[in-house]
Image (cartoon, rainbow, N blue to C red):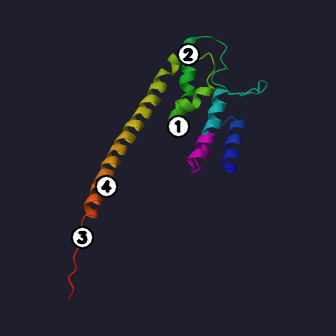
Amino acid sequence: MNHFDKAVKISLECGDVEMAKKWANKPEDHKIRKKLWMKIAKYLFGYQGKRKNKTNQFSLFYDDKSNDPHTRKVKINEALKILDDSKLKIDDLLPLFPPDEKVQDLKEHLCRCLKDYKDKIEHLKDELDDLSKNAEVLRTQHRKQKHKYITIAPS
């Protein structure tokens, strides 16, 4: 993790987001990969956390001087492209959005995320039903086997 972490950090310090993305995809461990992608997302979103005086030279939200809603929506969509490149979901990125951001601008991504969760739940329900049926078949077979016996005749 340490080398990948350093590689992503240095790439972002140099402003090379594409290189950081390449390094973030290299680890085999899903948790490490997600952590590295979150670093990239924080960089892209200009996330400053609790440190107020830290300034980010690159931010998709805070660079624009105009309050044009169309420009802002384009920047949001640009920032959300990270969802296509990585395994991150919109719920991972929600804390990074500015507090005044409208949910309407995120609607498409939120709906997709909710649909993915719904599909996973349906898949798990189907799997649970199949496993329950298999367990019942095994219980029935076990009950039948309890009452079986073999008589061995002496020779």
In the image as oriented, which residue stretches furthest toward the bottom? 155
Sequence-wise, the earlier of marks 4 and 3 is: 4
Q: Nearer the viewer, mark 4 or mark 3?
A: 3
* Residue that mark 2 sits on: 102
Q: State the CA–CA distance, disc 4 to disc 2.
A: 54 Å
Between the C-alphas of marks 2 and 1, the distance is: 23 Å
Residue for point 28% across, 58% down? 143
Q: Does residue 29 belong to the magenta stretch? A: yes
Q: Which residue is mark 1?
A: 85
Residue on which the image places disc 3: 149
Q: Which residues are magenta?
A: 22-36
Which one is earlier in the sequence, the residue at label 2 or at label 1?
1
101 or 125, which lies in front?
125
User: Which secondary structure, mark 4?
Assistant: helix
Q: Looking at the picture, which amino acid does disc 2 mark?
A: Lys
For residue 97, what is the image quadrant?
Answer: top right
For label 4, the residue is 139
Residue lying at 67% horizontally and 42% vertically, measured from the top left: 8
Residue 109 drawn above or below residue 70: below
Please identify, in this view, whether the residue under mark 2 or under mark 1 is nearer the observer.
Answer: 2
- Residue count near mark 3 (Cα–Cα under 10 Å), binned few <14, some 14–19, many ≥20: few
Name the residue at 45% across, 25% down: 111
Label 4, label 1: how far apart the Cα atoms are: 47 Å
